[in-house]
Image: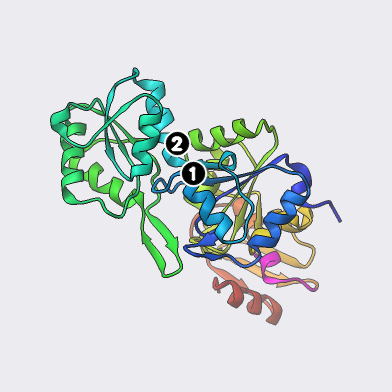
């Protein structure tokens, strides 16, 4: 059996919402898994598309949940969005901020001037999630974008996992401005590269592993950044979503939760499985050929289908073990 997945990497990039925690609750297994990464001496970066909190607040939240964390280990989409603006604008440029005080602070910290009204003549708009935004904020941003201002979105997540369920994310609000302006923003967070590139660069690493729960952000970002990824089934996306993933949203490994970082690479990688057989035709037919669990079946199904096609596909179990595995995965 091969070594652990972690053995091949010199930094682990952890998504937060839906991967490490859901709101105020740690995901099962997260504490032990991350502690074990630290004990191995491998750097971690907490990489979040949530732009509503300053990095210190993220640290405080993680520490409050029992995790070890420092500001240097946190990379937020607010930081990435502000950095993208700073690369494109001169010092002192006015930026209309549609977002939290944390986003305003990041903008100001890079020598730009945060404003809140179109009358202040902003040359750019930066947008991040903030639960206290009102119609007026979007109206001012709409006028600025229609007037030619550069538009940067910290992220495009349509939903945000919480302990109560999925809530509207920044991407849902980006859609509002997209509809009102007929314009497209530059995106700093996942799945675009700026946020991940900054996190890897800050760790001086060369063999990163991205770990997340969302195909359209965490995994798609890893694909764009040409880095391996581990998808965990603790947040937004389901086994059915994974099986039907487009080529640009396919992880290299799959696990139930963060403990998969320490599992043998040969076990968690999406590949043929010794305990399962998959026949590809008009449907996928899953058969057991040994003792295996449902996640092994999922990896086998993905490996077979991804090499042959994409999108929705019927799946059928040909024996009791296979049918049981498909029921557990909710893809029967």
Q: Residue 55 bears which disc, if any?
A: 1
The range drawn in magenta is 291-298
Task: Give me the residue at 21% from left, 26% from top.
Answer: 148
Residue 126 falls within the magenta-colored stretch:
no
Q: Is residue 293 above or below residue 212?
A: below
> Which quadrant is the C terminus positioned in?
bottom right
307 or 178: nearer the viewer? 178
Q: Residue furthest bottom?
A: 320
Q: Does residue 226 appear in this view?
A: yes
Q: Which comes sooner in the sequence, label 1 or label 2? A: 1
Q: Is residue 293 magenta?
A: yes
Residue 261 lies in quadrant? bottom right
Q: Position of residue 119 (x, y in %)?
A: 13, 30
Disc 2 target residue: 79
> Is 55 situated above or below 317?
above
How many residues crowd around disc 2 within 10 Å: few (fewer than 14), some, or many (20 or more)?
A: many
- In the picture, the quarter occupied by the N terminus is bottom right
């Amino acid at each position: 059996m091969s070594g652990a997945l972690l053995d091949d990497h010199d930094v682990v990039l952890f998504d937060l919402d839906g991967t490490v925690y859901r709101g105020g609750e740690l995901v099962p297994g997260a504490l032990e898994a991350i502690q074990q990464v630290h004990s191995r001496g491998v750097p971690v970066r907490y990489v979040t598309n949530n732009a509503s909190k300053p990095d210190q607040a993220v640290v405080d939240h993680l520490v409050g949940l029992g995790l070890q964390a420092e500001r240097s280990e946190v990379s937020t989409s607010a930081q990435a969005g502000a950095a993208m603006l700073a690369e494109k604008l001169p010092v002192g440029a006015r930026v209309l901020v549609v977002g939290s005080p944390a986003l305003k602070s990041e903008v100001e910290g890079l020598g730009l001037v945060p404003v809140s009204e179109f009358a202040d003549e902003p040359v750019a708009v930066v947008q991040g999630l903030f639960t206290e935004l009102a119609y007026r904020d979007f109206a001012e941003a709409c006028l600025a974008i229609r007037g030619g201002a550069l538009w940067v979105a910290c992220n495009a997540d349509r939903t945000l996992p919480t302990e109560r369920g999925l809530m509207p994310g920044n991407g849902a609000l980006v859609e509002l401005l997209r509809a009102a302006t007929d314009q497209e923003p530059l995106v700093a967070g996942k799945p675009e590269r700026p946020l991940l590139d900054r996190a890897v660069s800050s760790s001086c690493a060369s063999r990163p592993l991205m770990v997340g729960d969302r195909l359209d952000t965490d995994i798609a970002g890893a694909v764009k950044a040409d880095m391996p990824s581990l998808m965990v089934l603790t947040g937004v996306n389901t086994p059915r979503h994974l099986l039907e993933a487009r080529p640009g949203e396919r992880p290299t490994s799959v696990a139930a939760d963060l403990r998969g970082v320490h599992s043998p690479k040969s076990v968690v990688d999406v590949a043929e499985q010794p305990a399962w057989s998959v026949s590809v035709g008009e449907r996928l037919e899953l058969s057991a050929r040994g003792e295996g669990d449902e996640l092994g079946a999922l990896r086998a199904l993905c490996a077979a289908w991804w090499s042959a096609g994409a999108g929705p596909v019927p799946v059928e179990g040909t024996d009791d073990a296979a049918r049981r595995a498909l029921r557990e995965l909710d893809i029967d």
